Image (tube, rainbow, N blue to C red):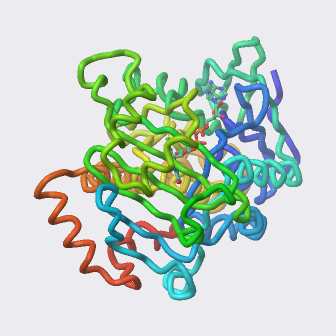
């Protein structure tokens, strides 16, 4: 068993090396703590698709010293547009330029997931985080003042604290909360990125555009310095409702979008059809901490993607956790500081993420509504000005408490 000691304080083990896990490892390592990441996969990888990072996350990436690299790898779009997928009408536009940055203190950035993970990985290496792959954590218990972790290969680790950032189907969460499958939304996502020169609407290339329609939407934006165009098509699967276990196939994708406007339909052939992402969330829970273990990211609060906030919330978790450790466990000693730090983290993050989880469901309902509801939605959107950010203040203006 690793003895879990170091000159900078006893080791904190992070389970899972996704965006949440690596951001957490980096934030804790920046405080001079000894941190180890155990990742189940054989490498640190992310799906080949884009990610939107709102200022509630980019401001924290700046604090961690990695925002410049993210800006360099990504794109700062000029605006965000919501359009009617059926008629092609632009309904509302939000300016993401100087006024936006002045309001929120940080930019809106869109980036390839690989690029973000790579930036975090490099920063973790530079901060001396121990990074291990092929480590499937199958057990995590608190014994005395230690978290004890067991991996499928028989290796064991003793830690000052264990942070479970092991995603939607977290085994650590399973142990904490017992059985409980994620909630399937019945919606499925198809993604794909294509070279920017192949895009047929060159006038929109500096825009995050969401085409909304009955039971479906399509999101498009440029990534990788504008070299690639990211597209995500999402629709409600008819065969999910009828209990088909293999729901959401490509033939349903084509049928769902068949009556949409040409600008939307033209995106479909360039989506990757061999792989699809059924979407899930969970009901919020108010207990993330057990002894020396705490949940983080999708393991704690998986949400539907309609607010583009799952990774942003994981980044907020990471920053809040690190601040809680700095306040309550500055010495890294066994004087109860870890318990106070984890409790403070849970207290701040549970209500915040529960609100985002619930709001994501509502936002999805608004996007996917049909009939009279859609007429009213469109009228409401048409009445909004492009510099009115008040509806998103609560979401994009959030900062972790400092005391
Ligand atoms: C279609 C779609 C679009 C999205 N768009 C956005 C967006 O624009 N903006 C945004 O902020 N969010 C978005 N999200 C949400 C975002 O992708 C997730 O919330 C985020 O990636 C979660 O990160 P995580 O690190 O918590 O979990 P994960 O990315 O799932 O990482 C978990 C890691 O833990 C590892 N692991 C699992 N089990 C074990 C184990 N037993 N032992 C060791 N390691 C383990 C996994 O291999 C993985 O590397 C979107 C989601 C979807 C589905």
Q: Quadrant of the N terminus?
A: top right
Q: Is residue 330 above or below residue 56?
A: above
Could you say which is closer to the camera, residue 331 or residue 65? 65
On the rendering, which quadrant does ligand 1 occupy? Answer: top right
In terms of image quadrants, where is residue 348?
bottom left
Residue 366 x %, y %: 25, 56
**Residue lying at 49% horizontally and 49% vertically, measured from the top left:** 343
Q: Report whether 181 appears left or right of 55.
A: left
Tell me: residue 372, above or below residue 187.
below
Give percent across and percent down for residue 175: 49, 22
Look at the image and tell me whether residue 255 can be seen: yes
Q: Is residue 347 visible?
A: no
Instruction: Tell which of 137 and 42 is nearer to you.
Output: 42
Residue at 53% from the left image edge and 28% from the top image edge = 170
In the picture provided, is 153 more to the left or to the right than 352? right
Count of numbered circles in the view: 0
Q: Position of residue 254 (x, y in %)?
A: 40, 35
**Residue sitting at 62 percent across and 18 percent down?**
138
Residue shown at 33% from the left, 50% from the top:
260
Q: Which of these two is toward me, 395 or 195?
A: 195
Outermost left residue: 372
Residue 233 versus residue 30 in the image, above or below: above
Image coordinates for residue 212, horizontal then vertical, percent: 33, 56
Viewer-proximal residue, 127 or 3? 127
């Amino acid at each position: 068993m690793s003895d879990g000691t170091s000159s900078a304080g006893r080791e904190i083990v992070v389970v899972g090396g996704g965006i949440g896990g690596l951001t957490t490892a980096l934030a804790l390592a920046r405080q001079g703590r000894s941190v180890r990441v155990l990742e189940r996969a054989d490498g640190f990888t992310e799906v080949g698709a884009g990610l939107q990072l709102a200022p509630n996350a980019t401001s924290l990436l700046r604090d961690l010293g990695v925002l410049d690299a993210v800006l360099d790898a990504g794109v700062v779009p000029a605006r965000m547009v919501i359009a009617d997928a059926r008629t092609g009408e632009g309904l509302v536009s939000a300016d993401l330029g100087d006024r936006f940055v002045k309001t929120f203190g940080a930019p809106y950035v869109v980036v390839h997931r690989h690029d973000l993970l790579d930036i975090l990985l490099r920063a973790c290496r530079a901060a001396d985080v121990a990074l291990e792959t092929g480590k499937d954590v199958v057990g995590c218990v608190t014994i005395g003042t230690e978290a004890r972790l067991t991996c499928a290969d028989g290796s064991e680790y003793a830690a000052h604290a264990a942070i479970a950032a092991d995603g939607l189907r977290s085994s650590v969460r399973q142990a904490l909360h017992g059985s409980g499958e994620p909630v399937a939304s019945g919606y499925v996502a198809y993604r794909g990125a294509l070279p920017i020169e192949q895009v047929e609407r060159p006038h929109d290339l500096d825009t995050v555009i969401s085409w909304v329609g009955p039971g479906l939407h399509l999101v498009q934006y440029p990534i990788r310095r504008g070299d690639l165009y990211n597209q995500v098509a999402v629709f409600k699967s008819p065969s999910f409702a009828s209990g088909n276990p293999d729901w959401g196939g490509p033939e349903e994708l084509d049928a769902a979008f068949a009556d949409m406007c040409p600008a939307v339909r033209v995106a479909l052939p360039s989506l990757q059809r061999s792989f699809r992402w059924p979407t899930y969330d969970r009901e919020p829970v108010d207990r993330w901490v057990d002894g020396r273990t705490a949940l983080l990211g999708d393991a704690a609060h998986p949400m539907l993607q309609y607010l583009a906030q799952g990774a942003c919330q994981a980044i907020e978790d990471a920053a809040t956790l690190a601040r809680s450790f700095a306040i309550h466990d500055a010495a890294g000693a066994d004087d109860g500081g870890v318990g106070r730090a984890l409790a403070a983290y849970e207290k701040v993050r549970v209500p915040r993420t529960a609100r985002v989880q619930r709001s994501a469901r509502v936002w999805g309902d608004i996007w996917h509504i049909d009939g009279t509801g859609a007429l009213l939605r469109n009228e409401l959107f048409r009445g909004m000005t492009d510099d009115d950010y008040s509806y998103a203040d609560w979401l994009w203006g959030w900062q972790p408490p400092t005391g």
